[in-house]
Amino acid sequence: MSTELLSARSLFCERDDRILFEGLDLTLNTGEILQIEGRNGSGKTTLLRILSGLSSHFEGELYWQGEVMGEVQEAYLADLVYIGHLPGVSGQLTAEENLRWHCALHPSLDIEKIDYAIGQVGLRGFEDLPAYQLSAGQKRRIALARLYMSEAKLWILDEPFTAIDKVGVAAKEALMLKHLSCGGSVILTTHQDMSDHMPVRTLSLGEPQEIGDE
């Protein structure tokens, strides 16, 4: 039986004299994938950053497992993996060193799974190279390796399939399905068409509105 993990009520956000969204409600239950859709500039990444606690420039309320987010934020962040549109990888560090650094910042990640994660994302043999020598897709794989190391309930992913080939996309979809089967949930944006068997629910953002427009 699914239970409510994350919810938002009456979210309002404006940026550069434009209202990105207002009166926005959403609910995410265990075992669900919620895809945020909308044109470029509609506020998809902004919404993900709000939900992940990286932006406070909004009005409205967020709830984690029925509790007001501000009262349980530490527990929420401990149960969250956020991977942004940029890979967040240091070019001077190797894949393994980047993942060790992420573990130091996010105690929920299991440092003992680094070698396993590197193998799962296809970086075996590249783990000792500085990331600046790797392709964009390989850097993205370093970021996505964190998912193989995490037991967090919620994954928030901004364009997780960028620069990933078809084999890599299929592997990430399989990983998401496994995550859902364990009671986890995913919120994501993607321009990639996901497979028909993926249980995706969509939330579409409208066009931003200039402040002052009727």
Image (cartoon, helix red, strand yellow):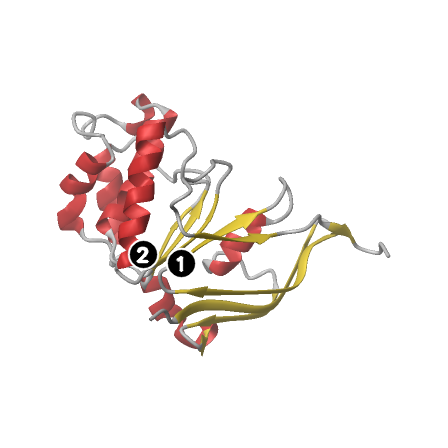
Across and down, in percent, residue 23 comes to 66, 66
**Circle 1 is placed at which residue position?**
32
Q: Nearer the viewer, residue 47 or 193?
A: 193
**Quarter containing the C terminus:** bottom right
**Residues marked 2 and 1 touching at CB (< 8 Å):** yes
Q: Residue at x 40, y 40 (%)?
A: 195
Q: Looking at the picture, does residue 83 appear above or below residue 108? A: above
Q: Residues within 10 Å of mark 2 (few under 14, many from 20)?
A: some
Q: Quick check: can you spot residue 147?
A: yes
Q: Looking at the picture, does residue 13 appear above or below residue 177? A: below
**Quarter containing the N terminus:** bottom left
Would you say 35 lies left or right of 141 here? right
Across and down, in percent, residue 62 comes to 51, 69
**Circle 2 is placed at which residue position?**
180
Per the rendering, the mark at residue 133 is none
Dot 2: element: helix
Would you say 154 lies left or right of 60 here? left
Question: What is the distance, in whole Å, between disc 2 and disc 1 at their CAs?
Answer: 7 Å
Would you say 54 lies left or right of 14 here? left
